[in-house]
Amino acid sequence: MTDTLRPVDNAVTEASDSPKTLKRSIGVVGGTLLTLSCVTPASTLFVVVPDLFGSLGTATALTIAIGSLLCIAVAFCYSELGTLIPSAGGEYAMVSTMAGRLAGWLVFVLSLLVVMIVPPVIAMGTADYLAPIVHLDPAMTGAGVMLLATLAGLLDLRANAWITGIFLVLEVIAAGLVAVLGFTHSHRGVGSLTSMQVADTGGHTTTVTAMLVVSGLAIALFVTQGFSTAVYLSEELEDPRRNVARTVLATLAISTVIILVPVAAITMGATDIKALTGGDISSMVTAWSNSAVGTFVSLCVALAIINAGIVMVIQNSRVLFASARDKAWPTPVNSALSRLGRFGSPWVATLAVGVPGALLCFVNLDTLYGVTGVSVTGMYLLVAVAALLSRRAHHKHTPAWRMPLWPAMPVLLIVVLGYILTQQETSYLLWTGGITATATLYWAFYLRPRKETHWVVSIPEDAQA
């Protein structure tokens, strides 16, 4: 912990090259709309949750509920750190400042894994929900969504807040409709939400073990993971000392309701355990209503996925922009990624996120849900460590939002998240560990020898005042 950064020391970056900053242009409402759109409740419900139904059956709602409770503690950590270190770098800026540059670099790599993998994975689901109207190739459709999201990401952030806000309304309507239909066509009582049953490959009902629920928590944490977007936007939020915490906590609360209530309704409304495990929510909606309603919901989900792509590209480009501003790469790369366009958006960083995302739609991503789950869990663990260190020295007296029950909250998170990691599949741990080890070598042989000029986290001047 000796190689840490203090915000007031950030002037050492490069005297002749003052760090570029983003424009503060949005308040709590705009930030919450953008953050909710990154959680993208409807696309999460229709694209990610079916996989949980396939492995956890009726225990899916319970697993997501437990994950949401853990996320409250995570949100407290993000809120406190995000107001202490309001930077577009998000997790890596917070962790670098509190726990050291190497820890910050590793959390940056984990966040980069998440932000590069998730958008194309979700985008590829668009074709399934356009199927009632037109049959398209999933990879081609996903690539098209990523390119469309990239073009939207080049616009002004305020304009994107309105675009994503409109799409968000449609996906909330779709999620609400699913909840109403599921509850009004219930085939089992509330007790089914804790019955822990799933159908095996032969269609027979089996019991979900507690260890399987713990293993599923990594994906459950990913279900509401987007609430952390607020800290990426903290450099563009007005009055970040107050609005970062408000945006983080409001987003987590709203997204949990939007996702968990329909999951409970689907669990109770599915005709049998086999249908629930199959996870074909569109077919369930059609069976509960008619084809027209099923088509409407599918179109809303398709729009939600496009919406998620736009917001994720916005979020991810800010991460790359901040890493270049903090000199994480060779000089030519830093210069390119830190360029701002006419709308004030980091246009090169936006292209660097969107175009590879389109290409990833043509790659086999079967194991990437597992890698993403491990990455999110590891990232949250490092954020919890940083939160545990957030009240040392001068940080103890810095004006900021402060979490309740500190230090018990981050300590509990560290223990629980560490245990969740031990329950993940070895292959997912090896993939993530191998990437992390490679990143550590880059740190050791390139960044650390240049520590006076590279990977020096900058905090906007108005945030230091």
Image (cartoon, grey):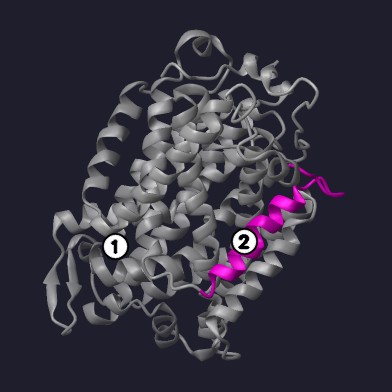
Q: Percent from the top left, x then y, of residue 363?
A: 49, 72
Task: Name which residue type carries label 1.
Answer: Thr
Of residue 341 and residue 80, the one placed in the foreground of this image is 341
- Quarter occupied by the N terminus: top left
Instruction: Please name the residue shown 70% across and 54% down the image.
Output: 350
Secondary structure found at label 1: helix
Q: How many marks?
A: 2
| Residue 277, image quadrant | bottom left
Residue 249 in the image: above or below residue 193: above
Tag shown at residue 168: 2
What's drawn in magenta, residue-wise?
A: 338-362
Magenta run includes residue 346: yes
The residue indicated by pointer 1 is 60
Instruction: Please name the residue shown 42% across and 75% down the image.
Output: 181
Label 2 close to label 1 by CB (< 8 Å): no
Q: Percent from the top left, x then y, of residue 180?
A: 44, 71
Tag shown at residue 8: none
Residue 440 in the image: above or below residue 386: below
Of residue 398 and residue 403, the one placed in the foreground of this image is 398
Q: Percent from the top left, x then y, of residue 428?
A: 31, 57
**Distance between mark 2 and mark 1 Cα atoms:** 24 Å
